[in-house]
Image (cartoon, rainbow, N blue to C red):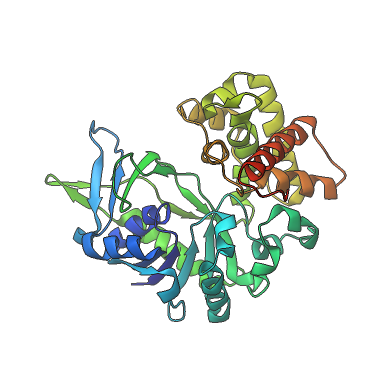
Amino acid sequence: MSSILILGASYGSLLATRLSMAGHNVCLVCTAPTAELINRDGTRARFPVEGRDQLVEVDSRKLPGTIAAAATGDAQPAGFDLAILAMQEPHYGEDGVRQLMERLARAAIPCLAVMNMPPPPYLRRIPGLQVDPLAPCFADLRLWDGFEPGLVSLASPDPQAFRPAGEPKNVLQVGLPTNFKCAPFESDTHTALLRRLSADIENARYEAQGESLQLPVKLKAHQSMFVPLAKWPMLMAGNYRCIGEDGIVPIANAVYDDPDRSRAIYNWVEDLCLALGAQRDDLVPFQKYAAAAASLKKPSSVARSLAAGAEKIERVDLLVQCISAQRGLSHPDVDAIVGRVNEALRHNRAAAGHLAV
């Protein structure tokens, strides 16, 4: 049985549910009201299961492991076996979370980031990549200075989940039940922990209406540290292209309104990942991605955030552009994506009375 700290109780509750199903104890870090709600009523995660018309709802209070919650200021990372960073990158610099991140760095426990935006310590593990010049891509590059690179790894947040409209904050519904793909840590001991958690989740079953069910959304531990980079071509060909000149569109439209262009962008970003050290088997072929994207009928979360007035978002688009520039590469469609995001952020900041770009 492992003790796991998860920063972020929304998307993080998905992994918390799967880990608690496998008998592990989880503490979710969130706001004080949400922590009070979870500690009183538990969490609910709803999964689509093949062969069933209705979603299967998992009540954390009925699981072999535990799910508790703590407010940001109360969380003490020392003593946990693993920390999972399941918030969007700009949030780690917020007051309260920043202090928690400092405590986490001092605790020197392995940290698995479940983020589209790879944290700087993970990027420092990529040979030949200059990380300090990437500072404009991050809300605060210096926030991560206290973390030892070997203790930070990355998982691709491929599963999609959302809070259903009108439901309390302890409820999460899975939309796309794919798997978290984890890169290894530098230490074999810490990587072995990921493999144990992966096996435990694989073997866990949930009893529903007298039936023992194997639920979707697994944690897959891989040997290559480049496996999570497979998300970059997807984000650039789909998610960030939901941001158009005249508003936002669903991911399916972003990919299929001009499939040839989508494929070209996807393949170009894929080539960049290969240049960084990824192998072809680490990545996902365009056709497989496109087949999954056809079912994504909502705009991406990054597009929805910008449309709602967000002044800070995860800038994977800018990261891809800056990393490619280090290698003397560029792509006009990538540049156009970055330009549209920059313009949307400028508009939002001006509307909020903040002039900084």
Residue lying at the far left of the rendered structure: 210
Residue lying at the far right of the rendered structure: 328
Looking at the image, residue 258 sits to the left or right of residue 7; the answer is right
Looking at the image, residue 348 sits to the left or right of residue 31; the answer is right
Q: Residue at x 53, y 75 (%)?
A: 104
Q: Residue at x 40, y 41 (%)?
A: 177
What is the x, y in percent for residue 277?
73, 52
To which quarter of the image does residue 61 belong? bottom left
Q: Is residue 29 above or below residue 296?
A: below
Q: Is residue 181 above or below residue 100?
A: above
Say how many tags the image has.
0
What is the x, y in percent for residue 330?
82, 38
What is the x, y in percent for residue 143?
65, 68
Can residue 183 be spotted in the picture? no
Can residue 40 be spotted in the picture? yes
Looking at the image, residue 346 sits to the left or right of residue 158; the answer is right
Q: Residue at x 42, y 56 (%)?
A: 12
What is the x, y in percent for residue 350?
67, 43
To which quarter of the image does residue 204 belong? bottom left
Q: Nearer the viewer, residue 318 or 31?
A: 31
Looking at the image, residue 190 sits to the left or right of residue 161; the answer is right
Q: Quadrant of the N terminus?
A: bottom left
Residue lying at the far front of the rendered structure: 353
Q: Nearer the viewer, residue 253 or 350?
A: 350
Q: Nearer the viewer, residue 50 or 176?
A: 176
Q: Nearer the viewer, residue 284 or 74?
A: 74
